Image (cartoon, rainbow, N blue to C red):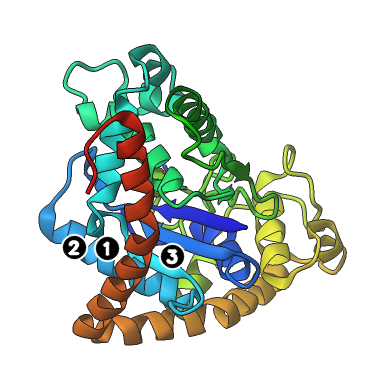
Amino acid sequence: MRVLSGIQPTGHVHLGNYLGAIRGWVEDQHHYDSFFTVVDLHAITQDQDPAELSAAVLELYATLLGSGLDPELSTIFAQSQLNEHPALAWLLECTATYGELHRMTQFKDKGKGSESVRAGLFTYPVLMAADILLYQADRVPVGEDQKQHLELTRDLAIRFNHRFGETFVIPEPAIPKVAARVMDLQSPERKMSKSQATPLGILYVLDRPEEIKKKISRAVTDAESQAAYDPSKRPGVSNLLEIFAAVSGTHPAQIAERYSSYGTLKADLTAALVAELEPVRLRTEEYLADRAELVRIMNHGAEKARAVAAPTLARAKEAMGFIVG
Ligand code: TRP
């Protein structure tokens, strides 16, 4: 079984990315033939700054390694290192329809019907399909918000196989249930998100212990004193309990029973988060301190990725009638 997932290098990695995605990947690499990619080509569909892009790619790549992704066990690379991705995306774009892409809710949300929206934002889901299909992935861990893109990926693969002959594996989405949604610490009715960050609402994996302490101690709760898990009525404290449960591998309601004061709940949660994140931060900083070595590891990942992606692209081209070799 092969797994593939991707993450965008936009802003720093936050707790939602870590608990909802990265930690699951670290687990997956022990059970599946695993491919993980920093989708930097997807990061230029909206305004971008070249210096920020390169810094963000290196930081994210280092954070993946610091979180425990092992470049020997998994294949870890940046999407832009392989021209196979945009090449297959073009072939697939010529099988996808305007109407199909126009129905993508993420495009509608981000594009807001504007004329000046980039064409790349419109075709974004096809590039994502190429990311997945190039590696013949069986299983794709993604958040709930990416389900529609996965459906499109499956449709495109089925259509291609039908029209040009068996070429692609049809992938299945894998939506994690644990901590799939870590909420903003200041506005707990809203997902923790890079695009809507309030300064104290978002906890970054590379935050120092004092920063974690500050953000957790100021996290919004409610006027009750006894902790209880009730996401709709008591979103703030429920989010803290959910985070605590995800970090300690228990259930939110069980943790709630142990606390009569928010002060001790917050202190213990801070300690648990620091214990989880501090080693990640220290390892990530070590990787970031040696840029040449980090780039060497990236190149090694890209080489392993190419060994799978290049033959898939060749098969797809040949199936469509291009002269290959
Ligand atoms: N679109 C995904 C997101 O925004 C990122 C992504 C790009 C991805 N290519 C992928 C995820 C391939 C899984 C597989 O989260």
- What element does badge 3 sit on? loop
Q: Quick check: 67 left or right of 76?
A: right
The type of residue carrying mark 2 is: Ser
> How many badges with numbers are in the image?
3
Residue 195 in percent (x, y) is at: 36, 44
Q: Can residue 185 be seen? A: yes
Quadrant for the N terminus, please. Answer: bottom right
Residue at coordinates 26% horizontally, 62% vertically from top-left? 56
The type of residue carrying mark 3 is: Tyr
Q: Can residue 206 be seen? A: no
Q: Residues within 10 Å of mark 2 (few under 14, many from 20)?
A: few
| Residue 204: image tag | 3
Residue at coordinates 78% horizontally, 58% vertically from top-left? 252
Q: Residues within 10 Å of mark 1 (few under 14, many from 20)?
A: many
- What element does badge 1 sit on? helix
Instruction: Mark 2 and ligand 1: say if the CB distance to the nearest ligand atom is below 8 Å.
Output: no
Distance Cα–Cα, label 3 vs label 2:
19 Å
Return the residue nearer the eye: 139 or 24.
139
Where is 16 relative to 64, above or below? above
Residue at numbered disc 1: 57
Distance Cα–Cα, label 1 vs label 2:
5 Å
Residue at numbered disc 2: 54
Instruction: Mark 1 and ligand 1: say if the CB distance to the nearest ligand atom is below 8 Å.
Output: no
Circle nearer the N terminus (3, 2): 2
Residue 285 in percent (x, y) is at: 34, 83
